[in-house]
Amino acid sequence: MKFYFNNGSCSLASHIALEESGLPFETVCVTLAAGQIQQADYLAKNPWGRVPALETAGAVLTENVAILQYIADLVPDRGLLPPSATLERARANRFLSLLSSTVHIAFRPLFRPNRLATTELGQADVIATGVEALNDVLKKLEAELSATEFVLESGYSLCDAYTLVFALWTQKPSARLLVTPTPNLHALAARVIKRPAVQAAMRTEKLIFIDASLTAA
């Protein structure tokens, strides 16, 4: 399998899944800044010009929610997601979809205001409005993470790997001074990054998570 990703993007979730799976794969970093993601050779694989993308079995699979489930089902003995056709799997799918369609999108005004407005004044308004909406989303996510050690009652899963992405995003310079505190999210992230597979993916992507519990006075 060949995995296409961008450092620190949402594709980290699928990157972690591959590391957790124990399956052989190679990585290709396509950088947004260099425009590689919009070059013809990559668009031939994924016309949407997004990451992640996974070449496997003669096809190209895109979107985290699809890739995460595909990898989990390739190695069911690893328990990366609950078994198919169970209520617990439905709950996992619901949470993965929530992260993809709601939490991810809420960060866009902070990271890409130029896609929503063309003037500096307009972009400042986009950010101000976006921060309010993002904090509302994070408040709801905090409530979802308050009851158990991991997202699912059954324990660690790829739901947690995907959630880690957004904990890292709250620590980006463009977000960290604007978002409200998220202690449940960051406590979950601190547990997740103890896993060797998570550490391996983060090393490849040159990522660091700042555990507030270790840096507090």
Image (cartoon, helix red, strand yellow):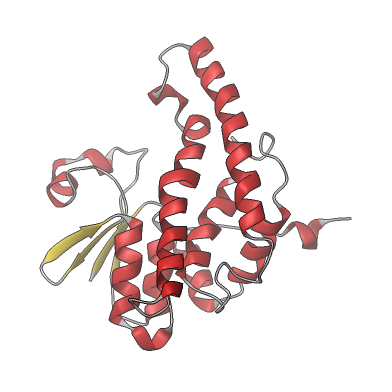
Of residue 186 and residue 7, the one placed in the foreground of this image is: 186
Q: Quadrant of the N terminus?
A: bottom left
Please identify the residue farthest to the bottom as the structure is shown.
77
Q: Is residue 28 visible?
A: no
Q: Does residue 170 lie above or below 174 as drawn?
A: below
Q: Position of residue 102 (x, y in %)?
A: 46, 44
Q: Does residue 114 lie above or below 3 as drawn?
A: above
Q: Residue at x 49, y 30 (%)?
A: 109
Q: Position of residue 44 (x, y in %)?
A: 12, 48
Q: Is residue 12 left or right of residue 28?
A: right
Q: Residue at x 41, y 50 (%)?
A: 100
Image quarter for residue 128? top right
Image quarter for residue 173? top right
Q: Quadrant of the C terminus?
A: bottom right
Q: Is residue 59 left or right of residue 168?
A: left
Of residue 32 and residue 144, the one placed in the foreground of this image is: 144
Q: Residue at x 33, y 69 (%)?
A: 69
Q: Is residue 127 visible?
A: yes
Number of numbered discs overlaid on the protein picture: 0
Q: Position of residue 16 (x, y in %)?
A: 43, 68
Q: Is residue 175 left or right of residue 81?
A: right
Please identify the residue farthest to the right as the structure is shown.
217
Q: Residue at x 64, y 64 (%)?
A: 188
Q: Position of residue 214 (x, y in %)?
A: 78, 63
